[in-house]
Image (tube, rainbow, N blue to C red):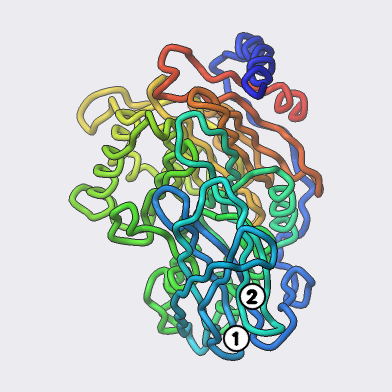
Amino acid sequence: MKSLLFQFILVPFVILNFVNNVNAGITSRFVREEWPSVDIPLDHEVFAVPKGYNAPQQVHITQGNYDGNAVIISWVTFDEPGSSKVQYGKSDKNYEFSAEGKMTNYTFYKYNSGYIHHVLVDGLEYDTKYYYKIGDGDSAREFWFQTPPMIGPDVPYKFGIIGDLGQTYNSLSTLEHYMDSGAQSLLFVGDLSYADRYKYNDVGIRWDSWGRFVEKSTAYQPWIWSAGNHEIEYMPYMNEVTPFKSYLHRYPTPYLASKSSSPMWYAIRRASAHIIVLSSYSPFVKYTPQCKWLEEELNRVDRKKTPWLIVLVHVPIYNSNEAHFMEGESMRAVFEEWFIHHKVDVIFAGHVHAYERSYRISNIRYNVSSGERFPVPDESAPVYITVGDGGNQEGLAGKFRDPQPDYSAFREASYGHSTLEIMNRTHALYHWNRNDDGKKVAIDSFVLNNQYWCVNIGDEVSLLGNAISRSD
């Protein structure tokens, strides 16, 4: 029935593709009346500390192994270490299983973190709702999560995508809209708390507030993490020179499961997708560990099991905004040819505080002595999408380069989030949703053709009717 419905939806999309299959991209003329790009005050209810002695807070889960039938559950306690134990089961308040983890903490300047707990819960059944309990006595807290379906080529699944979130009122609007999207897990493309915008002890305090801020989503579904520049926190004036110190203590990744040597880059398989997370701020040129790992991981991808190949990275490979223009050029020069050879479907990035989607283009024919100097249409290339528009306190990147480059399909400086709904091995539905003065408004949408299974189908079917009418 779902397949028939998808075919019914697809017919008008094909007609729209005939109408909109033109080279010129769209720069939206929409100008948002921004809410203040300032962080929400610490006494606001979105940062409320759970009641009770040593109550667990900042609860979040992420995928715990390569194939999705494990989670890492993390939380923080402040009064004392307490137990690093998770009780869980398949019915509410019936916790027939338990798992033990480990506790860590750290200092940042004179800030002492709480006791940070990480517990791997593995051996789970696929496509099953689990209830879990953490903490002790009357302060214990209870949550639940749903495991993904077993890996398979035609398994439907819906991902959300957010980047550069922060903790402003705009961030809150994005988070609440995302939670209404029906997405089953989130792909996060870096820049979490923006705590590095503060100094001294306030850095750690704003990491804690952000953990409580996102808990209403992160405690119930996996967020797949990648790091951005605001996680580096290189602050010599405070004698803090260890990059990613706060991030690595707080947000674990299942990097060992994909044979990675660093939690900064790793891969997972979930439902019908193979997701590769890269680090823009770790060495990636030839002979480095990240480069060698990526080459091996791309060769491990089995498109007959996981047809959809998705890459997450913080810095956009292609970007036509004045903000951070060409910062992704070095990674493009190293990896673009691999992305095309291995038929990557889509690459999501953040960093630029605006939204942009590219056509399928490449620049692999260029070198320093010969070749074409500009990106050209390439049906074998990924679609590049920038979603660094979560809502942080630095505000929007409102200045795009003029004229709009040929590779840019649609761009707008607004806050929002995206979803990618995989229908089967050949097609997925993509939507970008603008936060329009507190309301979720679908603006840019298209049907994404799978690069491995749809080699002869042609260009993506664009649904730019909303974008055209709303930007006029």
At 61% across and 34% down in the image, what residue appears? 411
Q: Is residue 259 left or right of residue 14?
A: left
Q: Is residue 335 visible?
A: yes
Residue 344 position in % (x across, y down): 39, 32
Q: Secondary structure at mark 2?
A: strand
Which residue lies under the disc numbered 1? 78
Which picture quadrant has residue 122?
bottom left
Residue 57 is marked as 2
348 or 3, which lies in front?
A: 3
Residue 442 position in % (x across, y down): 73, 34
| 24 in relation to 78, above or below | above
Query: Given the image, on which type of amino acid does mark 2 rest?
Result: Gln
Residue 308 position in % (x across, y down): 45, 33
At 72% across and 55% down in the image, what residue appears? 170
70 or 362, which lies in front?
A: 70
Query: Given the image, on which type of amino acid does mark 1 rest?
Result: Phe
Q: Is residue 394 visible?
A: no
Residues marked 1 and 2 touching at CB (< 8 Å): yes
Residue 203 position in % (x across, y down): 56, 77
| 391 in relation to 273, above or below | below
At 33% across and 59% down in the image, what residue appears? 256
